[in-house]
């Protein structure tokens, strides 16, 4: 836990694809441990694309003496496979997982035996009782496939009540959307912590592409400023640090239960934001 503010911080990585990537990530992790993360989670590709890499990275984090948390996406999998995976996690001493539906890579048509993350959460509770702290995903700006914002909120409430312990949001740059979502979830009787996910801004074309795919809105003024910088990476990074530091400051001041950084396997942006806010 962070010593100065006591605000729990967590970090998210993706599994590297090459031995060089794994070495680079090891150095990034060592630098980021300066922020004393409560845990570090590792993404998991539904449909088998990164599953071994996820587990190898979780084990490397655990070997560093930090809580390594696997993401587990249920789309395209069976109950038997999920049972075996949960047993593997349990046997290794994993106590926390991020339970997701996931997105299948293009070309995968089969849904498998789970349709929604809420079914996975229910399955985990039935199979393993209270063993795992189950994190789930939340979407303050609405999941892109949801029928409506209200339907998405209700689906989130169902997922929480199926046995989730806490939630991490998709990233956002509109704090109002987050606060509204938290209030609406509470009004539906959801009493778990909803921790904001924070995406540092380092590369405008990548951010715009990601945001279109995951339904996160980049406010017009941010997008226009990023577009105006063109290829000027230094200005994008400097502007991005200012914007995201302000965002985190507002969230912290409002008393959020924690902060989850999408570190994108880079240390500098998260370290600088935390340094500016006295979180590191
Ligand atoms: P769900 O909660 O199942 O929701 C999916 C959609 O179904 C939503 O539109 C929801 O409104 C709808 N829905 C849910 N339940 C019902 C119901 N009962 N009836 C009707 N509609 C319903 N993806 C990966 O592949 N790997 C990762 O490691 C990964 N990590 C992530 C971490 C975080 C913190 C976040 C926020 C997202 C992550 N994602 C990851 C992306 C996520 O998998 C996608 O957004 C995916 O499309 C939805 O997953 P979910 O668990 O939120 O699904």
Image: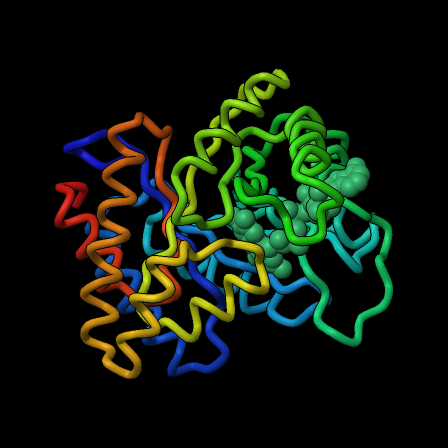
Name the residue rendered at 56%, 29% in the picture.
165
Q: Is any part of residue 194 visible from this angle?
A: yes
Q: Nearer the viewer, residue 82 or 121?
A: 121
The spot of residue 67 in percent (x, y) is: 40, 45
Q: Quadrant of residue 233?
A: bottom left
Name the residue rendered at 29%, 66% in the picture.
225
The spot of residue 184 in percent (x, y) is: 56, 24
Q: Nearer the viewer, residue 24 or 101?
A: 101
Viewport quadrant of the C terminus: top left
Name the residue rendered at 60%, 48% in the picture.
89
Relative horizontal placement of residue 112, taking residue 89 as reference (left or right): right
**What colour-coding does the image apply?**
rainbow
The spot of residue 213 in percent (x, y) is: 59, 64
Viewport quadrant of the N terminus: top left
Q: Is any part of residue 73 visible from this angle?
A: no
> Height in image: 146 above or below 53?
above
Relative horizontal placement of residue 232, taking residue 109 as reference (left or right): left
Name the residue rendered at 23%, 49% in the picture.
245
The spot of residue 201 in percent (x, y) is: 32, 62
> Height in image: 203 above or below 215?
below
> Height in image: 17 above or below 195?
below
- Report the number of numbered marks: 0
Q: Nearer the viewer, residue 112 or 182?
A: 182
Relative horizontal placement of residue 169, taking residue 189 as reference (left or right): left
């Amino acid at each position: 836990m962070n010593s100065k503010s006591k605000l729990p911080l967590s970090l998210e990585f993706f599994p590297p694809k090459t031995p060089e990537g794994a070495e680079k990530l090891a150095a990034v992790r060592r630098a980021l441990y300066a922020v004393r993360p409560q845990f570090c989670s590792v993404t998991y590709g539904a449909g088998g694309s990164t599953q071994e890499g996820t587990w190898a990275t979780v084990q490397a984090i655990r070997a560093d003496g930090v809580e390594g948390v696997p993401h587990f996406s249920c789309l395209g999998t069976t109950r038997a496979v999920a049972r075996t995976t949960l047993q593997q996690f349990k046997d290794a001493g994993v106590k926390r997982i991020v339970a997701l539906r996931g997105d299948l890579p293009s070309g995968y048509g089969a849904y498998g035996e789970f349709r929604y993350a809420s079914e996975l959460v229910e399955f985990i509770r039935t199979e393993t009782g209270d063993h795992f702290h189950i994190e789930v995903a939340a979407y303050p700006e609405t999941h892109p496939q949801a029928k409506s914002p209200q339907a998405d909120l209700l689906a989130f409430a169902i997922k929480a009540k199926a046995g989730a312990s806490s939630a991490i949001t998709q990233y956002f740059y509109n704090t109002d959307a987050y606060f509204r979502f938290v209030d609406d979830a509470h009004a539906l009787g959801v009493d778990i912590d909803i921790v904001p996910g924070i995406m540092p801004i380092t590369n405008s074309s990548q951010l715009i592409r990601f945001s279109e795919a995951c339904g996160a809105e980049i406010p017009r003024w941010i997008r226009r400023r990023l577009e105006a910088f063109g290829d000027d990476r230094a200005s994008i990074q400097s502007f991005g640090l200012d914007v995201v530091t302000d965002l985190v400051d507002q969230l912290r001041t409002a008393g959020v239960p924690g902060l989850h950084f999408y570190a994108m396997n880079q240390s500098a942006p998260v370290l600088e934001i935390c340094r500016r806010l006295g979180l590191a």
